[in-house]
Amino acid sequence: MGSSWLQEFWRFAGLLLLALLLGLAVGQVSLLLLLAVLVYLALHLVNLYRLERWLRGKGGYPPDTGAVWGEVYHRLYRLQRRNRKRKKKLAAMLGRFRESTAAMPDATVVLGAANDIEWWNDAASRVLGLRYPQDTGQPITNLVRHPDFHQLLEGEDFSRTAQFPAPSRDNVMLAVSIIPYGNNQRLMVARDITRLHLLEQMRRDFIANVSHELRTPLTVIMGYVETLQDGDDECARQWARELQAMQQQSSRMQHIVSDLLLLSRLETDQGRREDQEVDVPAMLEMLREDALVLSQGRHTIALEAERALWLKGSRNELRSALSNLIYNAVRYTPDGGPIDIRWYRDDAGAHFEVQDTGIGVAPQHIPRLTERFYRVDVGRSREMGGTGLGLAIVKHVLMRHDAELRIESEVGKGSTFAFDFPPALVDIRVPERERAE
C-alpha cells in the first residue's frame, strides 16, 4: 500500500475515532459516526467536483490536495503532459508529411475506408481537378471515372498501375498506383507519364511505318531472286548457293516484318477484342498438320483435345499465339523427340499445353522470354529461323484475352508452355453427331 493510501486510511480512522469519542461523551455514538462518514463523503465529492473542473479547463498545474487525491492529480497531470508531447510530435510529423507530399511533383490523395477523399496536394488539384473544400469527403470514383482506375481500386492486386488520361487535362497521361496503409486507408499516387507515353507511341509508330515500308522492297527483291533461281542459264547455276542464301534471308526478313506489323497492331489496338466463336480443336488439328510439314518427319507430334471445347475470342490472334508455341516446339526439339499438345478444361477455365523434349530454358531466362528480340542463344535462334518476336506476340494476345502464360522448363530435358484461359471465355459445343442422336 502506498504512502498516500496510508495517509488516507489514517485520516479516515482518526475521523471515526474522534466521532466515537464525542459520541460516547454526549451519548450519541451512532449519530456522530454517521455524521463523520457523511463529512468524509462530502470531502470526496468536493474533490471530485474540483477534479472535474480541472479536467474540463485548459489544464495547468494541479491543486495541492494531499493524500490520495493529490496522487490522482499528479498522475493525471503527468498523463496530460505526455499526451501533449505526443500530440505535438504527431502534429509535427503530419505537418512534415503534408509539406513533403505538397512538394511532390506526383499527385497524391489520401483516401478513407470508403474511398472518400480526406486530403490531397497541389499536384492533385492540377491534374485530377480536385477543388477545396467542395471535394473533401467525396468518393474518388465520382471524380475519376475511368474504368481501368475503378478496376484497380476495386481489386486486391495493388502491385500494378492503371494508365489513363487526366480527368481535367486530356493531353496528360497518368499512371496511378494505390498503396494500402493504416486502418483500411489508401494512398493514391498519380504520376505524369505523358513523355514516356509519347515516346512509346513514337516507337510503335516508327516500327509500324518502317515495317510497312519494308514490305514493298522485300517483295521486289524476293521476286527477282525467284526469277533468277528459275533460270536455266549458266549464271543461275553458278550463283545457285548465293541465290538460295538470298532467298532464305529475304524470307526471314519478311517473317520479321510480318511479326513486327502484327505486334504493332496488338500494342496500338486498345479497342474491344473480337468475340468470335473459335473452334480451337479444329484449329489445333490444322496446326498439327502444318507442324508435321515443318518437322519433315523428324518428330512425333501427338494431339489430345476436347472436341466440344471452344473459345470466345479473336480467331486470327488465337491462331497466331497457338502456332507460335507449336512451331517453337518443333524448332527446338532434337530429331526423334516427341511433342505433346493438350487442350482441356477444368474448374479454373480452359488450358492449352505444348510439352516438348527440347533443349530447355535456364530459370534466369524465363522471365524475359516475352521481351521482343530476346534470345537465350542468339546463334541457335537464328539458325532455327526464329524472329525473336513470337512470345512477345503471344503475351499481347493473351493480355487481350485475359489469359496467362505458364512456362516450366529444365535445361536438357524439355519445356512445357501453357495458356490458361478464364472460364468466361469457355464455349462448350456439342458435336453435331451427338445432337443428331
Image (spheres, grey):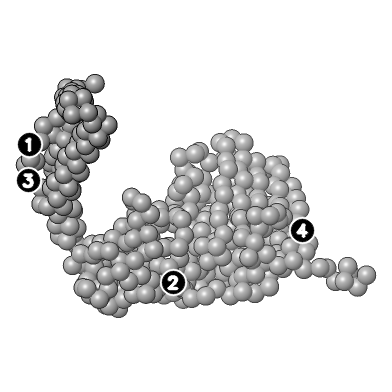
> Do callouts 2 and 3 mark residues in contact (Cβ within 8 Å)?
no
Residue corresponding to mark 3: 60
Q: Secondary structure at mark 4?
A: loop
> Do callouts 2 and 1 mark residues in contact (Cβ within 8 Å)?
no
**Residue 49 x %, y %:** 17, 47
> Do callouts 3 and 1 mark residues in contact (Cβ within 8 Å)?
no
The quarter of the picture where residue 80 lies is top left
Residue corresponding to mark 4: 306
What is the distance, in whole Å, between disc 3 and disc 4 at their CAs? 83 Å
What is the distance, in whole Å, between disc 1 and disc 4 at their CAs? 90 Å
Q: Which mark is residue 147?
A: 2
Residue corresponding to mark 1: 64
Query: Which of pointers 3 and 4 lies earlier in the amino acid sequence?
Result: 3
Q: Please name the residue shown 14% across and 30% down the image.
A: 67
Is residue 239 among what the camera can see?
no
Query: Which of pointers 2 and 1 lies earlier in the amino acid sequence?
Result: 1
Q: Secondary structure at mark 2?
A: helix
How many numbered marks does the figure carry? 4
Task: Please name which of the two marks, 3 or 4, marks the residue nearer to the observer.
Answer: 3
For label 2, count other residues whose C-alpha is less than 10 Å away and answer few (under 14), some (14-19) or many (20+): few
**Residue 110 x %, y %:** 28, 60
Q: Nearer the viewer, residue 85 or 376?
A: 85
Q: Please name the residue shown 25% across and 35% down the image.
A: 31
Q: Which mark is residue 259?
A: none
Q: Is 219 on the left or on the right of 31, as rendered?
A: right
Tell me the amino acid under the disc marked 1. Asp
Tell me the amino acid under the disc marked 2. Pro
**Residue 23 x %, y %:** 20, 28
What is the distance, in whole Å, between disc 2 and disc 1 at their CAs? 66 Å
Q: Please name the residue shown 21% across and 24% down the image.
A: 24
